[in-house]
Amino acid sequence: MSSCLSLLCFMVFGPPGVAFSGLPQAASPLPGTAIQAFGRDGQCAAWTDGCVTCAKVGEGPAQCSTPGIACTPKTITCTTRP
């Protein structure tokens, strides 16, 4: 029983003396590269990356759609100029 428990602990927690660093951290996006931030310069009224479509609505923040489950974003392009 004790050896079975030791094996289970090894499989779940790793070898003794090795610190668990947690899950890898996602890289933080560069400022201004998010699709929601693309239209902030006022040069574009609507834009897309092929997965998400965003549009400026008045003076408020851009309104964006939800991406599809298996969508791979492409280069962001402006679809409507003001």
Image: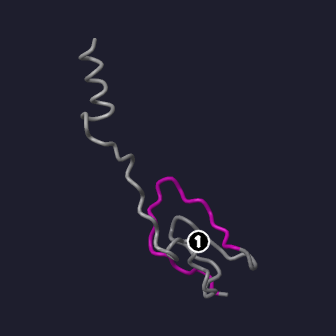
Residue occupying the point 33% across, 31% down:
12
Give the position of the N terminus as an image quadrant.
Answer: top left
In the rendered view, would you say 78 is above or below 72? below
Quick check: 12 left or right of 73? left
In the rendered view, would you say 27 is above or below 62? above
Residue occupying the point 25% across, 23% down:
7
Instruction: Identify which residue, 71 or 64, lies in the foreground.
Output: 64
Residue 59 x/y as whole percent: 74, 79
Instruction: Identify which residue, 30 or 6, lies in the foreground.
Output: 6
Image quadrant in which you'd find residue 38: bottom right
Q: Which residue is mark 1?
A: 36
> How many numbered circles does the render carry?
1
Instruction: Identify which residue, 77 or 32, lies in the foreground.
Output: 32
Q: Secondary structure at mark 1?
A: helix
Q: Is residue 35 magenta?
A: no
- Residue ranking furthest to the right: 58
In the rendered view, would you say 13 is above or below 7? below
Residue 78 x/y as whole percent: 56, 81
Amino acid at the residue labelled 1: Gln
Q: Main secondary structure of the magenta part?
A: loop
Q: Is residue 78 magenta?
A: yes
Residue 26 x/y as whole percent: 42, 58
Give the colour scheme shown: one colour
The magenta segment: 61-81
Instruction: Identify which residue, 35 or 49, lies in the foreground.
Output: 35
